[in-house]
Structures are given as C-alpha cells and as structure tokens.
Amino acid sequence: MGQDDVRHKENRERVFWQEFSVPWRFPVIYTRNVFAPANNALATVFQAAGPVPVLAIADSGVAEANDGLADAVQAYASSHRSALRLLSPLHVLPGGEKCKNGSAQVDRLHRLFHKHKLCRHSVVLAIGGGAFLDMAGYAAATAHRGLRLIRLPTTTLAQNDAGIGVKNGYNSFGRKNWVGTFAPPFAVISDLNFLSTLPKRESRAGLAEAVKVAVIKDAGFFQLLSGQRKKLAALELQQMEEMIIRCAALHLEHMAAGDPFEQGSARPLDFGHWSAHALEEASGGRSSMARRWPWEWLWIVSMQQKKGS
Ligand SMILES: NC(=O)c1ccc[n+]([C@@H]2O[C@H](COP(=O)([O-])OP(=O)(O)OC[C@H]3O[C@@H](n4cnc5c(N)ncnc54)[C@H](O)[C@@H]3O)[C@@H](O)[C@H]2O)c1
C-alpha cells in the first residue's frame, strides 16, 4: 500500500495509492497433430502441476468436420495420465457467431463447470473458432472469478489473432462484444492440421487479417504476402502456416509492447474494426467483420485524401 496522502485536511480525506503489478506469461505454440499421443505440446503445458483436472469442450463446426475428435482427446489423456485427468468425455457445443449472441451458451458452460466442480486449479480446454473461444473464454473468466483456460484455435483467424490474445466476450444489445473481460489464457496451442477442414470462406477471413497487420506494421511481411499471393489465394498450407505465425507474432509483440488491456486509445491493430463492427451489427450478423473491415480502410483513406492529409 502506498503512502497515506492527506490532501484536504478540512474534509479529513485520506487517499491510499494502491499499486501492484502482475506479470503474465503464457506459451503460444504452433504444432501439428496436437492429440497424437507422441505429441508432448499439451502435456508439457501442465509441467509438474499434473495431473490437472481438465474439462474439454469443442465447437460443433470443428467436431463435425473432424470425426473422432472426442476419441482422440480421450486417447491423449490416457497416454498422458501424469499431466492431465479428463473430467468427462469431450462436450460439443454450437460454434460460429451465433454461439456468442447473448448469454445462453455462457450460462450452459457455467452449469457444466458447476456440475464438474471446476475450481481455479482446473483447466478448461476449449477447441474451436474465434467466436467459440470468445464465448468460452468469457465463461471461464467469470466462473470462480477466473478458471484457467487453454485455447486450441481451429480457424485461420483464431490462430493468427482471435485465439492468441487476452480478450473474450459475447454480443449483447445487438452490439459486438458488448459483454466481455480481459483475461490472459493459461496457454494457446494451434494445430495447423485443423485448417484442412475449414471452409474456404473462413480461411480467407484470417488471410485478410494478416494483410491488414502487414500494411500497418511490417512492410517486409506485406512484400512476402504479395509475393506469395497466388499460393495464399489457393490456401496452400505451407504459405498459410508462414502467414499465420508471422501475423500472430506481430499481434503478440504489439500486445507485450503496449497496452494489452486497452486502457488508452483503441489499438492501431483495430484499424477497420469500427465500421466493420457497425456493418456486421447492421446486417444482423450475416456479414462477418473480418470480411468488412477493408471498407473502413477505403473510407478512412478517401476521407484523408479529401482532407489533403
Ligand atoms: N478475442 C479477440 O481478440 C478477437 C479478435 C478477432 C476476432 N474475434 C472474434 O472472432 C470471431 C470470428 O472468428 P472466426 O473467424 O474464427 O470464425 P468463427 O468462430 O465464427 O468460425 C467460423 C465457422 O467455422 C467453424 N469451424 C471452426 N473451426 C473449424 C474447422 N477446423 N473445420 C471446420 N469448421 C470449423 C465454426 O463452427 C463456424 O461455423 C468473431 O466473433 C470476432 O469477434 C475475437
């Protein structure tokens, strides 16, 4: 506690300046075949704390496209008994933007966490796209004032942006992310193989994010993307992998260097989000933000040109 500062003697007002800092550190891992028993990425995240009680939940989109996901999670836990203990078989819940419209899925997860008696020593392992991770992240952050969360992002946008940061939330009052918290994850593990089942339209949303970040932050990255544009347009996995990892690294650097809890002005990396969010809200969620932000760019740039700046 800081010094007792008596400012207004006549009012006997006493102010204590409370100050502390809490360093955050979490691994962001890129791998393949995360649930192959020989892959130690997930098991090593638990380090010596094991066996940690884990509740695994998955986005219905990824579970439907990856037959055998529940068995793979189960088999992984059986091969790494000293690191983790599954509290139940994999729970599959709806994914996509609709899962974060309102609090219904958050309430459902809270009931599940309560049923399985999760506490702050347990881990929620959430597998899915950005919308599912936002919703599940909020549920985890608000149960017992914060359960540990491991994110396994399964879309390009979730692997290069949405799944690696500190934000979560859901849409309310017809507004994007109106309810939410800042809550750093315990770990993030991206399995690039998940991208092979992703619809092309979704893969392109993550590509658009990388172009935006490159334009704002890294001319060399922009040149690389334009040099590989044909392979990227064809969504070739090797080029997509390079794009995802470099984009994620720029996001992580940006967060660490500046203002992770966005106390100051809006993030420069949110360039394009304002009107994109508005367009997504106006379309009732039919038009995704990731496909709309280029319109804000065009609008901002043309306004600047008109102003002659
Ligand atoms: N928290 C943040 O910092 C942050 C940052 C950017 C975006 N976001 C949020 O992310 C969301 C968009 O995320 P998104 O682009 O990942 O889309 P999404 O989560 O809406 O997923 C798109 C669709 O793909 C399905 N899916 C997911 N993985 C799959 C796979 N491997 N194979 C087949 N289908 C799969 C989902 O079920 C869904 O139907 C938005 O809600 C946005 O607000 C959050």
Image (tube, helix red, strand yellow):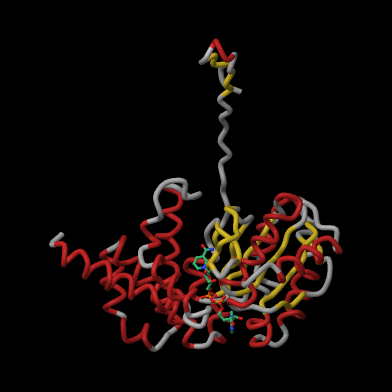
Q: Indicate left or right for 265 with 301 as reference.
A: right
Q: Where is residue 161 in the image (x, y as percent from the top left)?
A: 48, 66
Q: In which quarter of the image is the C terminus?
A: bottom left
Q: Quadrant of the N terminus?
A: top right
Given residues 47 and 109, the one toward you in this image is 109
Image: 122 above or below 75:
above
Q: Which residue is drawn at 61% across and 56% down?
A: 185
Hey, which residue is sitting farthest front in the picture? Answer: 10
Q: Indicate left or right for 180 with 109 as reference.
A: left
Hey, which residue is sitting farthest top in the picture? Answer: 9
Q: Residue at x 30, y 70 (%)?
A: 297
**Exactly how many numbered labels are in the figure?**
0
Which picture quadrant has residue 45?
bottom right
Q: Indicate left or right for 80 with 280 as reference.
A: right
Q: Position of residue 124 (x, y in %)?
A: 72, 62
Q: Position of residue 75 (x, y in %)?
A: 77, 75
Hey, which residue is sitting farthest left in the picture? Answer: 308
Image: 207 above or below 272:
below
The picture quadrant for ligand 1 comes to: bottom right
Given residues 10 and 185, the one toward you in this image is 10
Q: Residue at x 32, y 86 (%)?
A: 230
Q: Residue at x 28, y 71 (%)?
A: 299
Q: Where is residue 305 in the image (x, y as percent from the top left)?
A: 16, 66
Q: Indicate left or right for 2 with 233 as reference.
A: right
